Amino acid sequence: MVRLIVTDVDGTLVKDGGSVDSFNPAYYDVIRQLKEKGITFAVCSGRQLVSLEKLFYPVKDIIYFIVDGGSMVFNRGECIYSKVLPKRVCDELIDDARQIPQCEIMVCGLKRAYAASADSEMYRWMVDGYGYDILAVGDIKKNVPDEVVKISLYHHNMVEKLTDPWFRPRWENRVRLNIAGIQWLDCVPPDSGKGSAVAFIQEQLGVSKEETVAFGDNQNDIDMLRRAGKRFAVENAREELKAEATDICGLCLEDGVLKELIKML
């Protein structure tokens, strides 16, 4: 019996950085019908809450939001779970990230996201695509008035390659590193991540792994899938995620997840 459905967003439900205009509104009715059948729906994403609430606005009060790569969980607008990075770790991480000049840096806090400048490719994409609440503060090491839940490195198509030689080996045992598409490397607290957040919701609801279904497409979804008895990778997923899946569903851009949800109904 299915009691909990958890899904990634970018690359799984919409194209990377897709706005509400690219989201199939048929999901809203399906989520409502799942709720009527006693099945909880949770969105699990690297995005912030504001961005996800715009996508899921008609059903935002009946679903769980796992945001910022698993660092926070929200239910009906209330933060019920959060993990933060110590200030010292943030400062060191930013210093190292600055040594990769091709990458931009985004700091995600409990309140909003922060960038150095509003005049950048990343900043414009966060606002125009993801619909982020993001503030340009100049020096992101000194001027972020917030506790930090995630630090992300951005490059439009080579973040994995650019961070491979020394950055990821240097940090892989100090924080949780998640490759999220070709653009993002997310650095989150070591005791957070999508899998940990899903485990928290399962405990809250008294739901077992066998009663959970998960959908994903990327490396940062692996821990989430491991918390589910039935694990779907969309057809466009990375091969290492497909290796973790029990099933393959259709492409993101062909509403592969939606079709599986309708079958469950």
Image (tube, grey):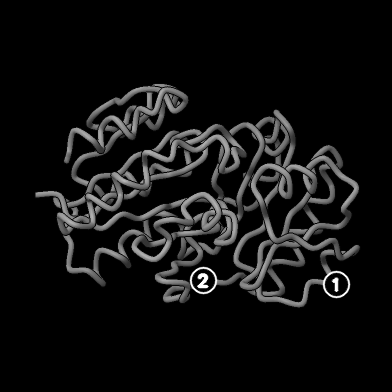
Furthest residue toward left? 1
Q: Nearer the viewer, residue 91 or 185?
A: 185
Q: Where is residue 241, by image quadrant?
A: top left
Q: Is residue 122 left or right of residue 109?
A: right
Question: Helix, strand, or loop for circle 2?
Answer: loop
Residue 52's spot in the image, x, y percent?
53, 54
Question: Helix, strand, or loop for circle 1?
Answer: loop
At a point 42% along the width and 43% down the height, the residue shown is 221
Q: Nearer the viewer, residue 95 or 46?
A: 46
At a point 91% along the width and 63% down the height, the residue shown is 138
Disc 1 to disc 2: CB gap under 8 Å: no
Q: Where is residue 248, by image quadrant?
A: top left
State the mark number for residue 221.
none
Residue 127's spot in the image, x, y percent?
73, 50
State the mark number for residue 83.
2
Disc 2 crowd, CA 10 A, few/some/many (<14, 14-19, 20+): many
Q: Nearer the viewer, residue 88 or 196?
A: 196
Q: Is residue 166 above or below residue 145?
A: above
At a point 58% along the width and 58% down the height, the residue shown is 48
Residue 193's spot in the image, x, y percent?
46, 57
Q: How many marks?
A: 2
Disc 1 crowd, CA 10 A, few/some/many (<14, 14-19, 20+): few
Q: Earlier in the sequence, mark 1 or mark 2?
A: 2
Amino acid type indicated by mark 2: Lys
Amino acid type indicated by mark 1: Lys
Label 1 belongs to which residue?
Answer: 142
